Amino acid sequence: MTNHPRRIDHLVLAVHDLDSAAGFYDRLGFQVGARNRHPWGTENHVIQFASSFLELITVADAELIPAHAPHSFSFGQFIRDYLSTRQGLAMVALDSADAEADAADYAREGIGDYQPFTFERSGRAADGTETHVAFTLAFATDERLRHASFFVCQQHHPEAFWSPPLQRHGNGSTNVSGVCLRVEHPADHSGFLRVFTGGRPSDDGRLYGLEHGGRLELESTAGQNRLAGFTGFTVSVPDLGATGRQLAAERIPFEDSPHRIVIPPDQAFGAEIAFANARLRSRPRTLPAPGGPSGHGSLSR
C-alpha cells in the first residue's frame, strides 16, 4: 500500500451529449482533444493539463458494454448506470506506479476485490505521428457511495502520452487542483479514503491533501435530502479576472468571489466547475518526474 498521498490523475465526466459537452468546454477556454472510441462501447474527449486531465465521456453503443461480474468491475456499465440517473462527475482516478499491486492491496484492505483491468490502443501525438498507449486500472469500492467510482490508473507509456502542446489552454488552466465529494457523514468514509488516497484527513475529516497541490474535499449532507457522490472540481488558473471576462463574453453564467469563479452544475452538464488562482504553476511535462510515481496525461484515451 502506498505510504504517500497520490495525485489526481483524471476525472471522468459522464454526459448524455458528448458533442455539446465538448463545445461547452471549448467555450470555457479549454483545448479539447479529438473524439476517441473505447472497445467497450463508450466514447470520449480528453482535456489535458500538466499532470492531470478531464475525460468527457458518453455511451455510444450500449450493446458492447460488458456487465459487472465477480472480481470484475465494468467501467462501461458504471457509466451507463450513472447516466440513467444523472450527468456529472462520475469517477475519480488517482495515479498508480503499480496497479496490480494496488489491486492486491485493495483486496487485502477489503475495499475492492477486482482483477486489474488493462487496455491499450493507438493514438496520435500533437504533431500527427502515431503513438501506442496502454493503461492498467485498479478499482476500489465504497459500498455507501453507489454513484461514485474510485480507481487508480497506471500509464505504461507516459513518454507517448504527455504532450505540452495539448496542455495550453486559452483560459490559462494549469491543472485539476481539487475534487468535491458529498457524503452524509465524512467520518464514515475515512478508512476507505485513507487507503485510496494514501493520505490522512484533516482534523475535521473533511480534507485529504494530495500530491501536486491537489485536494479531495468532503461536504456533509447530514440532515439534508441531497444525493451523495462527486459534485464538482476545481481547476487552477493564473488570472481569475481574465477567466471571468472570457466567461462573460461567452454568456456563460457564473458566480464570482475574490478567490474563485464557480459555474453551477445546472449550467455545466451536472458538475460544478470552479476556477481558482494557481498557487504554483505546474510545468508541462512529457515524462514522469525522475524517481516519482508514473504519471500520465492524455491526447487520446
Image: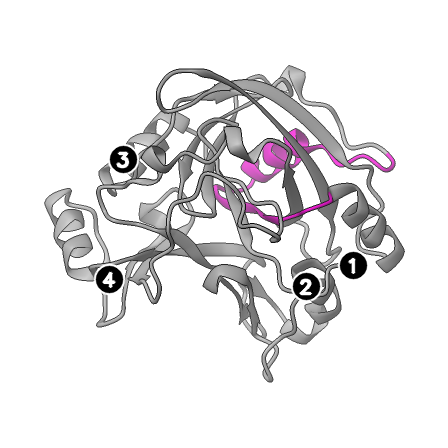
Q: CA distance from mark 3 to mark 4?
A: 19 Å
Question: Which quadrant of the structure image shows residue 156?
Answer: top right
Question: Where is residue 258 drawn, in percent x and y?
Answer: 22, 72
Residue at 61% x, 49% y is 95
> What residue sits right under mark 4 in the picture?
255
In the picture of the structure, the residue carrying the numbered disc 2 is: 198
**Would you call the spot at circle 2 few (<14 residues within 10 Å), some (14-19), or many (20 or more)?**
many
Q: Is residue 249 above or below residue 227?
A: above
Residue type pointed to by label 3 = Asp
Q: Residue at x 47, y 48 (%)?
A: 51
Q: Are marks 2 and 4 in contact (CB under 8 Å)?
A: no
The residue carrying mark 1 is 1
Amino acid carrying mark 1 in the image: Met
Mark found first going from the N terminus, 1 or 3? 1
Task: Identify the residue shown where x is 35% and y is 64%.
Answer: 280
Secondary structure beneath dot 4 equals: strand
Residue type marked 4 = Glu
- In the image, 285 versus 52, the foreground residue is 285
The mark that comes first in sequence, 3 or 4, is 3
Side of 47 relative to 145 (left or right):
left
Determine which residue is flagged by label 3: 26
Amino acid beneath label 2 = Gly
Mark yes or no: residue 168 visible.
yes
Task: Report whether 180 appears left or right of 281.
Answer: right
Whether residues under marks 3 and 4 lie with C-beta atoms below 8 angstroms apart, the answer is: no
Give the Cα separation between the discs numbered 1 and 3: 38 Å
Instruction: Verify CB contact (< 8 Å) between mark 4 and mark 1.
Output: no
**Magenta region: which residues?**
70-98
